[in-house]
Image (tube, grey):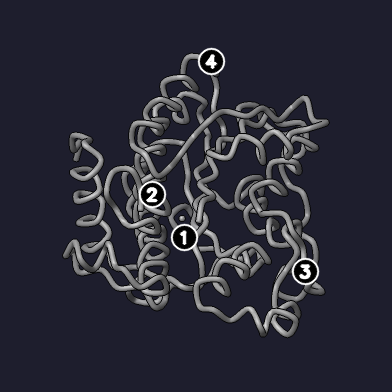
Amino acid sequence: ATRRPSCLSPPCLSPPCLSPPVWGNTGIGRATALRLAGLGARVVLACRNQDKAREAVTGSTDVVYMLLDLGSFRSVRSFAESFLKAEKRLDLLINNAGLLTTDGFGIEFGVNHLGHFLLTNLLLERLQEGGGGRVVTLSSIAYRWGHIDFQVGDLNACLFFSAYCNSKLCNVLFTLHLAKRLQGSKVTCYSVHPGETSPKAQLCFHVLVLRRVVPIARLLFLDPATGAQTTLHCALQEGIEPFSGRHFSCCAVEELTPRGRDHAVAQRLWEVSEQLCGLSSTS
């Protein structure tokens, strides 16, 4: 968001994990963008599917579309360059993507982690200029089953479930170390488990060939508007700044497993990510 919403403390709905689950057909990103726009924010919806993006922004003058393919470093750099020229302010960056990339990395690691890592670093200075920006990165409860040993074959795992869990652990560790690097500034960051929503369910079921159980699984997932509540909480709630670097679920801080709070692994992941993205280390 490049303009702060008029309301900075919207109440959560009943905690997402307790809300009646509904089978929907739109995503958390769209629900989040439209909610922020409804609160008065100017929102740049950055995504690779032009048709879906334009459909999502139809009827809202406060939501604009810019092309961004997180699976391509060239696209990320091009977007950042165009954004910095067009927008003089950035208050909120929400990293919300969940998918082989053009740079040769597995789709989960390349998009879910490296794409977000590069984008955040390219826009970080503009966030700091505003004097109170936030970075919200969507992770998942799946981080608990992730494992990182810095072997290319592991980070770039071929099995969907393993690769997905690894990338979600990367999201958590990225946020953990980003908070450390941001100490002394007014920019804060948070990782989020948004809740299970239908688009993610469809992806998992497609890969695991479990379509036959979809009618049963519909009872387990949230609609996107409800699933977006924890993201919006971390984006807008006043008073959570002391929790920078922490993980949120159901609009509340959640304690991470030991793997999710390993500062040594988080720092090493940052260094490896800098190398893979072609960024020079600053600390």
Q: Nearer the viewer, residue 177 or 55?
A: 55
The crowding category of the residue bearing disc 3, from other C-alpha atoms within 10 Å (few below 14, some 14 to 19, many at least 20), is: some
| Type of the residue with mark 1 | Arg
The quarter of the picture where residue 143 lies is bottom left
Q: Amino acid at mark 4?
A: Ala
Mark toward the start of the polypeptide (4 vs 1): 4
The residue to which callout 3 is attached is 23
| Left or right, residue 255 beside residue 231 | left
Q: Amino acid at mark 2?
A: Ala
Element assignment for label 3: loop
Q: Circle 1 sits on which residue?
A: 246
Q: Please tell me whether mark 2 sits on a helix, a strand or a loop.
A: helix
Quadrant where the N terminus sits is top right
Instruction: Tell me if residue 188 comes above or below residue 196 in the rendering.
Output: above
* Label ID, residue 179: 2
Q: Which residue is mark 4?
A: 86
- The tag earlier along the polypeptide, 3 or 1, is 3
Which residue appears at 64% of the width and 62% of the height? Answer: 199
Q: State which mark lies toward you, 3 or 2.
A: 3
Asked if the residues shown at circle 4 and circle 2 are in contact, with their CB atoms under 8 angstroms apart, the answer is no
Give the mark, 3 or 2, whose residue is nearer the N terminus: 3
Going from N to C along the chain, the mark reached first, 3 or 4, is: 3
The C terminus appears in which quarter of the rendering?
top left
Give the mark, 2 or 1, whose residue is nearer the N terminus: 2
Image position of 216 (left or right of 73): right
Q: Residue at x 31, y 68 (%)?
A: 158
What residue is drawn where x is 29% and y is 68%? 157
Look at the picture and state if 243 lies above or below 149: above
Q: Could you classify mark 1 by the number of other residues whose Cα lies within 10 Å: few (under 14), some (14-19), or many (20 or more)?
A: many
Q: Amino acid at mark 3?
A: Trp
